[in-house]
Image: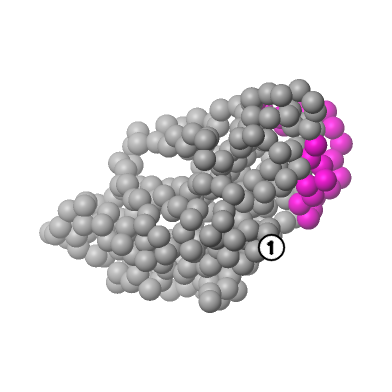
Amino acid sequence: MNTPDQSPLGKTSVWPYRYDPSLLFPIARAGARAELGLRDDALPFVGHDDWTAYELSWLDARGKPCVAMARLCVPASSTNLIESKSLKLYLNSLAQARMDADEAVRATITRDISTAAGADIVVDLLPITGALPVREPEGECIDAADIAIDDYGPPCPDHLHTHAQIVEETLVSHLFRSNCPVTGQPDWASVQIAYRGARIDRDGLLRYLVSFRSHAGFHEQCVERIFVDVMARCRPASLSVLARFSRRGGIDINPWRATPDMPMPPPMRCARQ
């Protein structure tokens, strides 16, 4: 079983000159989920990891470079997540590969990442201009709350509590920060929480999200922890948790976890992405 310390993260890497799908480094989701009391065969959510790769290039049949962006949708039900630096190395291995058509590129990426993830993924190639609208996640921002905060980790679900009023609302915070579990480098995100149920105390929610500030966890694992904690403490009838992380190495990752009745978030990117 691959572990994060075996990944190319934090290590000097030689940029690949030839196409090499073995560069992809899968990490089993089961370990982090077990810490949350989850089993892969009985997940309390649906969802996906929506990746945007901004640096993709290959050669056409006559050797002329082509460029595009790639949107990769990895289902939350997949056995593995893909370590992000390994994805960057893999995509760069296509730079000198000759492909007859865009469809050959899309099919190649789909096949290779599906194999690594242990599930069928969806890949779309996007033009480098105008493909993804730039806007912020919809919802009411809670960041202006006039509160004192002194808890920066580990994540503390004790901050979460509710009021008697039943509501349907969407809340957003741009203050989220966690840290890479391998390199310790910070990861920044805008978090959107949509729910139906007892009104979640906003000050407590903001304190809870800020308590990830010194937490070490992959993007996908952080979002699953938020989903599990909010469900356990606030017991909403419906819940959607989306985090849009700032890009690193030309790639952004946007994990989404939700109860089955909640709508899928639309394709977009934030100004920080």
Of residues 244 and 49, which is closer to you in this image?
Answer: 49
Of residues 152 and 40, which is closer to you in this image?
Answer: 40
Q: Could you tell me which residue is drawn at 87 percent across and 36 percent down?
A: 148
Residue 192 visible in the snapshot: no
Q: Could you tell me which residue is drawn at 64 percent across and 46 percent down?
A: 227
Residue 272 visible in the snapshot: yes
Find the magenta span and give its range. 140-161
Q: Residue at label 1? A: 35
Vertical order, 129 against 51 (above or below):
above
By secondary structure, the bulk of the magenta-drawn segment is best described as loop
Vertical order, 143 against 96 (above or below):
above
- Tell me if residue 160 is in the magenta stretch: yes
Q: Is residue 247 left or right of residue 66?
A: right
Q: Quadrant of residue 130?
A: top left
Looking at the image, which residue sits at the far left? 62
Q: Is residue 148 left or right of residue 52?
A: right
Residue type pointed to by label 1:
Glu
